[in-house]
């Protein structure tokens, strides 16, 4: 499943994350219960999740 899509954007629109927010953005999802998919209620109309 690698390389199934590519995003093309103007280089002026690319930004970098703030290194001071690295913990919030890149810590393992297991440490954050709200990132677990069972935390959210998915409507029956939404398929393939």
Image (cartoon, grey):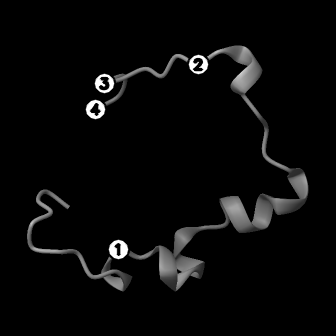
Question: Where residue 21 sits: x, y (%)?
Answer: 82, 61
Q: Callout 3: few (<14), some (14-19), or many (20+) C-alpha neighbours within 10 Å?
A: few
The residue that disc 4 covers is 1
Q: Callout 4: few (<14), some (14-19), or many (20+) C-alpha neighbours within 10 Å?
A: few
At mark 4, the secondary structure is: loop
Asked whether the residues under the numbered discs 3 and 4 touch, taking CB atoms below 8 Å apart as contact, a structural biologist would say yes
Asked whether the residues under the numbered discs 3 and 2 touch, taking CB atoms below 8 Å apart as contact, a structural biologist would say no
Q: Earlier in the sequence, mark 1 or mark 3?
A: 3
Q: Nearer the viewer, mark 2 or mark 4?
A: 2
Q: Residue at x 71, y 16 (%)?
A: 11
Q: Earlier in the sequence, mark 3 or mark 2?
A: 3
Q: CA distance from mark 3 to mark 2?
A: 17 Å
Marking on residue 9 = 2
Question: Where residue 1 sits: x, y (%)?
Answer: 28, 32
Q: CA distance from mark 3 to mark 4?
A: 6 Å
Q: CA distance from mark 2 to mark 1?
A: 29 Å
Can you tell which quarter of the image residue 47 is in? bottom left
């Amino acid at each position: 499943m690698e390389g199934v899509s590519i995003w093309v954007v103007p280089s002026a629109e690319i930004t970098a994350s703030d290194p001071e927010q690295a913990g919030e953005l890149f810590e393992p999802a297991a440490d954050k219960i709200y990132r677990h998919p069972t935390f959210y209620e998915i409507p029956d109309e939404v398929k393939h999740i």
